[in-house]
Amino acid sequence: MTVSDNPTEALVDRRILRPTVLDLGDALLRPWGRTLDVPGGIVPALVAASADPDIARWNPLSTTDPAAAEAYLDRADARWAEGTTAGFAITDSADGTLCGNAFLQWSNQADGIAMVGYWLLTAARGRGLATRATTAITRWAVETADARRIELYHAVRNDASCRVATRAGFPYEGTLRASYRYTDGYQDEHLHARLATDPE
């Protein structure tokens, strides 16, 4: 049997996440990696993002110094090359500044199950960017990589993230007890999910 004759392998081949730019109008979703450029440099921007109190609380970054930020970019390049994780920097269309992050990665590539997440810098909040970025990468994954089910997790106490999930069309499905270790210990998380067959 050749690879093309194996239905499971053919599905995985179709589910490769390939670098692209997604246009939100006032912002662009651009692939993370060494070639990404923003005003002032992407490494200093990542170091600054790691110090944002809300990011540090809900989406702690390992980019606390330049070497760690460079390693983060190398990992992003490697994951794009593997086609298993799509990490996007959200940048302002007008001035190119970094606004945040949105990502999608396979949880079960063969079965078409992925997970989506996001964070925004303080200055970029209040514009609906997290909701629009989540909607855009979900649609992109369904249309170009045959994603079947996309899951979204957030700490129960993270009300802002819960609102993003709801606005992006991810219904609440349940609470996962002591699901993820945050900086202050294990916390319960809400699970939201969207199916490719759900209406826009």
Image (tube, grey):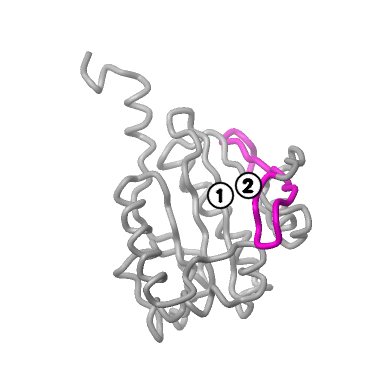
| Residue that lies at the very extreme toward the top in this rendered image | 1
Q: Nearer the viewer, residue 104 or 64?
A: 64
Q: Nearer the viewer, residue 59 or 178?
A: 178
Residue type (three-letter) at the residue carrying disc 1: Val
Label drawn at residue 116 = 1
Image point (52%, 35%), residue name: 113
| Residue 84: % across, % down | 39, 44
Label drawn at residue 106 = none
- The first of marks 1 and 2 along the sequence is 1
Residue under label 2: 152
- Relative side of 135 to 85, left or right: right
* 68 is higher (above) or lower (below) than 1: below
- Relative side of 174 to 53, left or right: right
Q: Quadrant of the C terminus?
A: top right
Q: Can residue 189 be found in the magenta stretch?
A: yes
| Residue that lies at the very extreme toward the left in this rendered image | 2
